[in-house]
Image (spheres, rainbow, N blue to C red):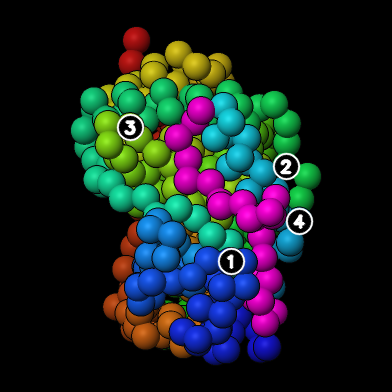
Amino acid sequence: MSKFSFVDLTPDSILDAVESIGIYAESGLLALNSYENRVYQFKAEDGYRYVVKFYRPERWTKEQILEEHAFAFELAEAEVPVVAPVCREGESLFEHNGYLFALFPSVGGRIFEVDNLDQLDVLGRLIGRMHQTAKAQSFSHRPEISCEEYLQTAKVHLQASNLVPMALENPFYTILDLVINETTAQYKNVETTRLHGDCHAGNILWSGDALMFVDLDDSRQGPAIQDLWMMLSGDRNNQLLQLDTLVAAYEEFCDFDHNQLKLIEPLRAMRMVHYMGWLAKRWDDPAFPRNFSWFAEDKYWEQQILALKEQLAALQEAPLKLLP
């Protein structure tokens, strides 16, 4: 199997994998929106709807995936609403033809509204409950959010890809280095906990009358603010109101270190750079040029130069503070 390849993952092999754990599909396979892994929804003969996720080869080790599953089970046991894997004969991670895969219940719901303060209030309590459970222990196998991975390694992938147009290389890497240096200077001595890791609106659902976390694939150690800051949008005043709503609700269940507010802009910068590096690293996967064709266009890199300049300015501003 070649690196980052899903070439052997045919519909027949997917069904064979699912049948190998005693689940038999009644409907066809519906491919869901996932680029890192391959994810399919189907209805089984037992009357339930499932989602089967095939993990990208060579991304996570078995130990790291099982640690993700254990975290989901721990949250579910603490009655934190989360979509946890299905266990079959005591196992949650399976292998078929070299691919690791897991089965999840299919959960429908409404999309979370990030600009709705009432919903942010509910979410703040939910994240607080999650982090209160997460503090009980640390991950042993899954990585920690770090400048080395999110900035330095991402830059290496960008340089190796040769996707930055030659005429823009100098201005792009000049501003990128300034952002990397400033972010690295600010992201130091960080207290970490187990995180969802990718807590944005697409990974939160209203299921019935309750909010529910989905997709812990990016869970790792990091600062608690990582699971909060991606909910902020709009101008500075709007972000202050949103942040105050989130943190006040969060603190009903879990203590929050207000010093972590200064990490918001460094974490935003790290996410920006890491995202570009991720696309560059995955460019050999045919799904990426097909779905992210703009990544190879001059206009995109011109926009990123501007975005990085704006982010550098944001890094140099005073951090957000909660309303008095």
Point out the frontmost of discs 4 and 3.
3
Q: Is residue 298 above or below residue 212?
A: below
Q: Is residue 131 visible?
A: no
| Cα distance between the residues tagged 3 and 1 | 31 Å
**Residues at circles 3 and 1 in contact by the CB criterion of under 8 Å:** no
The residue labelled by disc 4 is: 63
Q: Between label 2 and label 3, give the one nearer the viewer.
A: 3
Mark 1 — residue?
22
Magenta stretch contains residue 307: no
Could you tell me the amino acid type at mark 1? Answer: Gly
The residue that label 3 is drawn on is 210
Tell me which numbered mark, 1 or 4, is placed earlier along the sequence.
1
Instruction: Check the image and report above or below for 244 versus 216.
Output: above
Residue visible at 34% across and 21% down in the picture = 244
Q: CA distance from mark 2 to mark 4?
A: 11 Å
What stretch of residues is rendered in magenta? 79-100
Which of the image's four quarters has the C terminus?
top left
Q: CA distance from mark 4 to mark 3?
A: 31 Å
Query: Which image quarter is the N terminus in?
Result: bottom right
Q: Nearer the viewer, mark 3 or mark 1?
A: 1
The alpha-carbon separation of the residues under discs 1 and 2 comes to 31 Å
Q: Earlier in the sequence, mark 1 or mark 2?
A: 1
Q: Is residue 228 left or right of residue 97?
A: left
Instruction: Give the label, 2 or 4, closer to the camera.
Output: 4
